[in-house]
Amino acid sequence: MTYGIIGFIMERGLRISHYVERTKVLGPFVRSALWVQGCCFSCEGCMAREMHAGEGRVVSAAALASSLLFIEGVEGVTVSGGEPFLQGEALSALLLEIKSRRDYGVIVYTGFVYEDLAERARGDDAIRSLLTLTDLLIDGPYVLELDDGYPYRGSSNQRFIPLSDRYAEIFDEYYNSCRGRKIEINFSRGGTTLVGVPSKSGLDSWRRVRNTRGYLRHG
């Protein structure tokens, strides 16, 4: 992308559901987490169906970059959804802006498999750019029958694919040592948000909170 194109895209709308400033359950170190709105998959058992359709909240990439850059004490961001690669152009502009001003790690969850994205990237600048900016990709659709309770991903078909060496030194310790799934439930004036990949017990706890507090968000 040229500077002029990036500047134009930065002012365009990025459809998001929500973000949290800090979490410890969606990747190594303390990081922010962003959930985009809109998905092309319809996975049975998906916990984030409220992020499939509708506008969500439309923000400019420039405004969101400023908000994320303001957050102190985070190593980077984890992007989920929804499906991030449906908004590859705007997300790439967002991440380019942040990375130009800060050493920033990027983890992306996607329902696409990496090989398909790599093939499509040959003719799609947005996909190619987002892949280039991603340090760790967690790929593949959620498959209910393959949900084995392993931490950090929903089902056993999903893979942790390093696209840079940023997390190489801590990768095995963090991702290959099974310590069970962990979640965070965040309460704020904007609503109540579940962060992380829940186990059955975590999901049950979430549902109990949801039933007592009304509509809540999952991420």
Image (cartoon, rainbow, N blue to C red):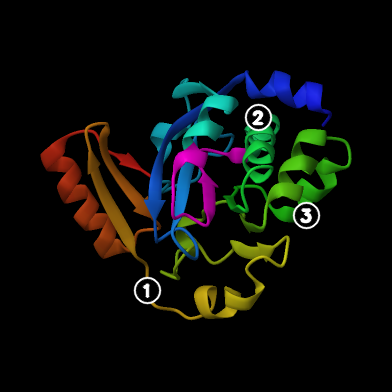
Query: What is the residue that sits farthest to the left in this orientation?
Result: 212
Residue 45 within the segment the image draws in magenta = no
Residue at 52% across, 45% down = 80
Residue at 39% across, 55% down = 23
**Up-down relation of residue 168 to residue 95 (above or below):** below
Which contiguous range is marked in magenta?
68-84
Instruction: Give x and y (percent) for residue 102.
Output: 61, 48
> Tag 2: residue type?
Ala
Instruction: Give x and y (percent) for residue 116.
Output: 77, 49
Q: Residues within 10 Å of mark 1 (few under 14, many from 20)?
A: few
Image mark for residue 90? 2
Q: Quadrant of the N terminus?
A: top right
Q: Secondary structure at mark 3?
A: helix
- Report the side of 180 relative to 159 (left or right): left
Q: Nearer the viewer, mark 2 or mark 1?
A: 2
Instruction: Give x and y (percent) for residue 133.
Output: 71, 48
Q: Which residue is mark 3?
A: 115
> Tag 3: residue type?
Glu
- Mark 2 or mark 3: whose residue is earlier in sequence: 2
Q: Residues within 10 Å of mark 2 (few under 14, many from 20)?
A: many
- Mark 1 or mark 3: whose residue is earlier in sequence: 3
Q: Secondary structure at mark 1?
A: loop
Q: Nearer the viewer, mark 1 or mark 3?
A: 1
Q: Which residue is mark 1?
A: 180
- Mark 2 or mark 1: whose residue is earlier in sequence: 2
Q: Is residue 38 visible?
A: no
Q: CA distance from mark 1 to mark 3?
A: 28 Å
- Report the side of 136 relative to 71 (left or right): right
Query: What is the residue that sits farthest to the right in this orientation?
Result: 122
Q: Secondary structure at mark 2?
A: helix
Quadrant in which residue 137 is drawn: bottom right
